[in-house]
Amino acid sequence: METPTIRTAPATNDADAFGKRCNNASHSEQMHSSQNIFVGMTLILIFAEVLALYGLIVGIIVSSSASQSRAD
């Protein structure tokens, strides 16, 4: 019984060629890329939390101002 061999087709378009280049990239390049993504996502998370906190504070101030003007 013969063992089937797996043959890969040559890159037919740019996406295939890009995938083959990415598979050949060194481990340190891949780690550097994932560290850059992690830093970027962390910064986006921090800015989103600051914006949400600012919205919460403004909402509390507006709400307290509205309740004080109704009481007068």
Image: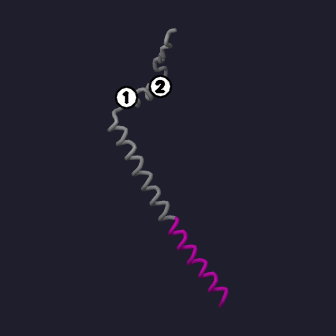
Give the foreground label among 1 and 2: 1
The 10 Å Cα crowd at callout 1, few under 14, some 14 to 19, many 20 or more, is: few
Question: Mark 1 sits on what residue?
Answer: 24
The CA span between labels 1 and 2 is 13 Å
Q: Earlier in the sequence, mark 1 or mark 2?
A: 2
Position of residue 26 relative to residue 45, above or below, is above
Asked if disc 1 and disc 2 are in contact, CB closer than 8 Å, the reply is no
Q: Could you tell me residue 10's position as x and y percent?
A: 46, 17
Q: Which residue is at 43% across, 29% downward?
A: 18
Label 2 sits on residue: 16
The secondary structure type at the circle numbered 2 is helix
**Quick one: 40 or 1, which is closer to the camera?**
1
- Residue 32: x and y in percent read 35, 42
* Depth order, front residue of 47/25: 25
Q: Is residue 64 covered in magenta?
A: yes
- In the drawing, what numbered circle is on residue 43? none
The amino acid type of the residue labelled 2 equals: Asp
Whether residue 9 is in magenta: the answer is no
Mark 2 surroundings within 10 Å by alpha-carbon count, few (fewer than 14), some (14 through 19), many (20 or more): few
Residue occupying the far right of the picture = 70
Q: Is the magenta stretch mostly helix, strand or loop?
A: helix
Q: Which residue is drawn at 59% across and 82% down?
A: 65
Specify the quadrant that holds the C terminus: bottom right
Q: Which stretch did the figure color magenta?
A: 52-72
